Image (cartoon, rainbow, N blue to C red):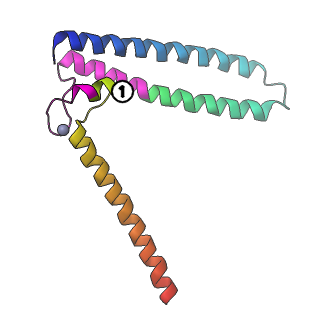
Amino acid sequence: MKKEALKKFKRVFEMQRRNILFNDRIVREDFSVCSDDRFDEVDQAATDIEQSMRMRLCNREILYLKKVEEALRRIEEGTFGECDECGEEIERRRLEARPTATLCVSCKEEQERREILTAAGRQHKSLGEAFSKKLA
Ligand SMILES: [Zn+2]
């Protein structure tokens, strides 16, 4: 990949990382407000639900942050844009749409096909079991 393109991706990732970290800080500040309010027992259940919702959002962001940091590491190492499976360059259009992609289109499709096959296999098996129970 050309240096300019790499720089562009690096800028995008650094911006995303900043955004995630900034949001995370806000969430933490909200948490401390919540724990100060704990004496109000009527609102406790609602607060718990709200907190777990925030936690989920937070975890998803942490997961994405890990991907972003992995991508930044790849840029540093010079392996960014290479497919994890076959080592070929990941299509530029795919990277533009999903900058954290680590598989090229054909490897990704292959992976999805495998997943569908395994899921279908499981379904067939349980269908077969139900069928044989009916017959028995
Ligand atoms: Zn590939």
Amino acid type shown at disc 1: Lys
On screen, residue 63 above or below 36: below
Dot 1 crowding, Cα within 10 Å, few <14, some 14–19, many 20+: some
Residue that mark 1 sits on: 67
| Residue 106 visible here | yes
On screen, residue 71 above or below 7: below
On screen, residue 82 above or below 15: below
| Residue 42, horizontal then vertical, whole percent | 85, 32
Q: Nearer the viewer, residue 63 or 116?
A: 116
In screen coordinates, is 3 left or right of 57? left
In screen coordinates, is 71 left or right of 132? left
| Residue 99 visible here | no
129 within the magenta span = no
Give residue 11's quadrant in the image.
top left
| Residue 100, horizontal then vertical, whole percent | 32, 27
- Residue at the spot 25% in from the left edge and 10% down from the top edge: 7
The stretch in magenta equals 64-93
Q: Nearer the viewer, residue 61 or 81?
A: 81
- Residue at the spot 27% in from the left edge and 45% down from the top edge: 109
**Which residue is situated farthest in the bottom direction here?**
136
